[in-house]
Every structure is written in structure tokens, then in C-alpha cells.
Image: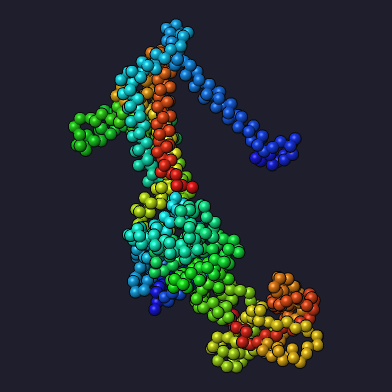
Amino acid sequence: MTALTIDRINKRYGNLHILKDISIPIAQGEFVSLLGPSGCGKTTTLRCIAGFERPDSGRILFGVRDVTHALPEQRDIGMVFQSYALFPHMTVAENLSFGLEVRKVSVADRQRRIAEVLAMVRLEGYDKRYPRELSGGQQQRVALARALVIEPSVLLLDEPLANLDATLRDEMRFFIRDLQQRVGITSIYVTHDQAEAMVMSDKIVVMSAGTISQFGSPREIYERPVSQSVAGFIGRSNTISGKIAEALGQDSYKVETPCGSIGTTGPAGLAKGAEVKIMIRPENIRTLRHDAGISRQQRAGEAGHGDNALTGAVVNSIYQGSANQLAVKLGSGDRIVVDVGGRNPLDVGEQVTLRFAARDTWLLAS
Amino acid sequence: MSAVEAAPRVEGRSNRGTATWMVVPALVLLIGFFALPYLTIITMSLREASTRAVYGEGFTLAHYTTALGDFYIWGILGRTLLIGATVTVISLLLGYPVAYHLAKSRSRWTSLLYIFVLSPLLVGLVVRTFAWMIILSNNGVANQALKATGLIDFPLQLMNNSLGVTIALTHVFLPFIILPLLGNLQAISPDLAMASRSLGASRMRTFWKVTLPLSMPGIQAGTILVFVLSISAYVTPAMLGGTGGRTMSVLVVQYLVDNFRWPAGAALAIIMAAVAVIFVGLYLRLTARAMRRLP
């Protein structure tokens, strides 16, 4: 069932077209991230859903209810802000009570629900504190509790973790995701942090310049991006330009490149001769010393990676602790970034063979 | 601080020592031009009256007992406080919406509104008061306009009473409440109002429960400024007040200059100052309760 429908909304500020025909269907209980660089329209979209901005055209439905012209206070939303936006002159309990008082919930019910939600965010005993007496992480948990205690139909989160330090941010990602799944509330999460969107979301809306670049699960967006900009925005990627030489199946192609012929996977329906870019993620490439004697077993073990082989020279090597990142320059001049696990046995200047499977590649329209 | 950072090792002098020295100029000014004159006035108010000098030889409390036993002076004191309170309340009611609008507005006309707000201070005191006389006198602009529209047959008494003083003081002191309020309102994150409305509160409820309580420091600062300035104003009540709108400041000057009663005038000035301190002190205690939960 569709809990929230954004139907072709447009928003202009003067000459600026901020949102161009944005449509997003969101199912009940889904966690959807709006991901993109600043100025892409993600926050404006969220504000349209909240009611703080009114789209120039298009509709917003909560279930079957058209809320396009409803005021924020009539929409039944819970909202969490980057700045936490806790009322500084109220205690934690009073902050939580605010939305319940508006809804005329009885004193006894208020107390019960506040206690429940405080337990949920693991802040029992903090009810009499003022926001200024809490750490950033605690304040954000109170903000989350305040949004959830009114049991809204949609939870809107506007970069809620951006003000927290890295360690706490990682912790809060899982905390929020876990809480969201336990409560089962439909949630929309605005972020510019792709890692955050990847680990938290059921679906990601990748936005750029007021349009939706791609809408799909984190896996689809990571493995099957629709464009080079999406591929570049989510994780690291390498691209090699080429032309379709032959369609081998519905979604597999042979691509002619300056480095030779490469077996690839791509969207169905690409025509022979079409200009494409082959995307390969750094972690899907195996690196072998070019002239080293490779045992039979090793060769057998590489079978899955053996579909394609390119040769080049290591031009850069960065130690990252858990892995090493190598930059390899191919004969064609393309630079390919490769992850090499464990201790790095390869030095700058060494000749290497890069192996990767056709199924680990994806073709992007050029 | 910058001086300290620029020369960090000058004879190992501590930050604290340097900072103390830096208040000296202000302190000298304060003692020389505020504390000493006040002490002189207090001393003068305790001297005996004299016809040959500003004050006589001996000391006496008579000026205070006479003043405090005089119903006429009590009346003027009451009127002064009433004018002060009225000006303060009206300025708050008029100024708050302006400050609120200025704090929220992102229009490019905002800077024009700023100039409007400051305009009463851009015109000289005497000129401004004369302008009010032209407007408020019996055959002034206001009365003629009212007569022309047929609303009145006889001119309304708009000056030479408390009304005229109140109108003119409100006009000139409006910026003194708008500016502190504006600073306060601008410091309140707009996210708070959004959070309130997302929780289901209407604009009205958001204002009463969130914005207004958080703007109490601005209200407090602005109202105290306007009140203190109003009760101590001299030129405006002197020119527009006549006898019906005479305030303590006017009376004090009359004692000193017209009647040459320096010790009695000094006593009146001290009484006025003491009353102002008491009222502001009470007001601070009252408003502090409303602000005790603010950070």
C-alpha cells in the first residue's frame, strides 16, 4: 500500500526551477532517503511534504488523503531537524508533551507515552533535564522521541546526523534504522551522505539539479546505476569508454575499447555501435603480478574473475589500514582504482594484470 | 586580548592583569561624570537652603520630609510613572510586530523599514517636538483633519497634558524597544517554530508557547530602556506637557532654574532616581521569574 505519494510536483523561486516534476511513491513502513548534493532539491522536497513549502503544481497524498494544500499542523507528521530544534525553555518531558497536549491527550496517557518513548530511545530518567544539559547525541534522541511520541503517519528527517561527530553518527545510523523498523513508521530521510543512505534505506532517491536521477534500492543504485553521475556519487567507480561490438544476450555485451575487447553486463536494448562507459567498482577487480608464476590452483580460483584481463602499471599506492588502494595506469592511458586486501605486495611501477568478471561490470550510456 | 597575543611575553604579564587595566578609562569616565556628580547632588539635597549661595552651611532632612509630605509632588510622581508605564506598554504593543516582521522578513525592502524604525532618532529632539506641537495643538493638523471629516466640532485637547507627552515619547522611544527585540528574535532558530508546527501547533499556539517565551529577554531589555528613558525625559514633557502634563524632570528643572531652590530640587531628583531604581528592581524580579527556564 502506498503510504505517501509525491505526484509530479514542481517548485520555482523566481527564475530558479528548484523541483522539476518530482514523483516518488513510498510504501507503508518504508525508509526512503533523498540523496544528493546541496542545492539538488532534496530539502525543498521534504519541506513540501511537511507543508512548509507549497509546490507550484502537482499533488502530495498521505495514503488517499490529498494534503497538498494542508498546513503543516494539519498533516500529522513527525519531524527531526539537523539542529535538533528542541524547545530550550522546556524540559525533555515538556518537549515530548508538547505534541500530545496539542492533541488533547489526557495527563495519564501523556505520562505513559512519554515514559514509553523515553525507554525506546534509552533516555529513561532524563525527563526533567533541559536540552542544554544533554549531549548532541542525546538531544537528537530526544528530538526523535518527540517526533515519534505523537505517532505520526510519516516521519521526516532532515540531515539529523550532520551535526554529530563521526563515531556517534555511525552509531546513530543503526539506532535510527532499528527504531524505525521496530515502530514500522514510513520515513523520509534527507542526506548528502551516500554511506548513510546506503546503510539505512529501503529505497534511495538520488537527486540532482531538481530532478530524480534514480529511484531504487541501495543495491540497484550501487550495482546498476543509470548514469555516470549516479555511479560517481555513490561509492567509487572506474569507467572505461568504448563501443558496443556485439550483444551476447539480453543484458550482456561485448564492448570494444582502446584496451581491447571486454565482456560486460548492461541494461537491455543497447544497440551495436552505441558509445558506452564500462563501470567497474574497485573492490570487484583482482590484481595479479604480471610476470609472477601463478599456480594452477590460483588460476582455478580466479575463474570467476577471469572473464576480462587488462594489463597496466601501478602508479600510486595508498595504505588505508584495512585495504590498500592502488591506481593502475592501463596501456590506453585510463587510470583504474583497485582495492587490494591485506598487506600490499605491489609496488609503484610494477606491471600488473587486472581481472574482473563481466557480471561485475555495468554499462552506462555515454 | 589582541594586544596580549601580539606581545605574548612582555615581562610575563598575565592576561588578567592586562584586562583589568583596560577597564580603567571607562571607570575614570564613570567615576568622574556619573558617581561624583551624583554624590554632589546627594550632598546638596541634604544642605540647608540659602538665599545668598546655592546652598547653606548646615545639614538637614527637611527637603525630603517636605517633598514627601506634599500631595502635589506625589501627584506629579504618579503621573510621571503612569506616563512611563503607558509609553512602555504602547511601545511594546506597537514595536513587537515590527521587530517580529523584521526578524522574519527576507524581502529587500527590509532595509527601508530599518530606516523607518530609526527615523525618530535621526531628527533633532527640539525639531521633532516642534513637529508634534504643529500636529497636536488646538488648531493643529490632527484637530483640523478631524474637524474636516466632521468627527468633532470642537478641538480635542491633544497637548499640554499627559496625552501629548505620551504620544510624542512613544514615537521617539519606539526604536529602543524594537532593536533589542529584533536582536533577540533573530537569534531564535526558525527551526523551533517549524518543529512546533510539525507537532500540530497552530501559528498562534506556536507564538504563545515558543516564540514569546523565548523573546522575553528582548522584551525585558526593551521595556526597561523605554521606561527609564520615558520617566527621565525632559524636553518633550517640557514643550508638550504644559501644566497638565508636567513630569518630575520638568519640576526638578523648575526648582533649580526658575525658583533657585537647589537643595529642594536635588532632593526631588534623588527621590525620582530612588523610585526608578525600586520600580526597575521590582520589574526585574517579576520578569526574571518568567525567564528562569531560559538558557
- Tell me the residue at 55%/27% (across/down): B30
Residue B4 percent across, percent down from the top left = 68, 39
- Tell me the residue at 65%/87% (across/down): A357
Tell which of A97 and B167 is nearer to you. Answer: A97
- Tell me the residue at 55%/25% (across/down): B31
Residue B19 percent across, percent down from the top left = 64, 35
Is residue B139 visible in the rendered image? The answer is no
Residue A317 percent across, percent down from the top left = 74, 73
Seen as rendered, the residue at the extreme top is B52
Tell which of B220 and A10 is nearer to you. Answer: B220
Q: Is residue A209 above or below residue B82?
A: below
Q: Is residue A348 above or below residue B244?
A: below
User: Which image quadrant for residue A243?
Assistant: bottom right
Is residue A90 visible in the rendered image? The answer is yes
User: Which image quadrant for residue A225?
Assistant: bottom right
Q: Is residue B51 above or below residue A305?
A: above
Seen as rendered, the residue at the extreme bottom is A248
Q: How many marks do you count on the picture?
A: 0
Tell which of B184 and A320 is nearer to you. Answer: A320
Q: Quadrant of the N terminus of chain B?
A: top right
B82 relative position to A16: left or right: left
- Tell me the residue at 64%/84% (across/down): A242
Residue A45 percent across, percent down from the top left = 45, 67
User: Which image quadrant for residue A304?
Assistant: bottom right
Instruction: Report the colour scheme.
Output: rainbow
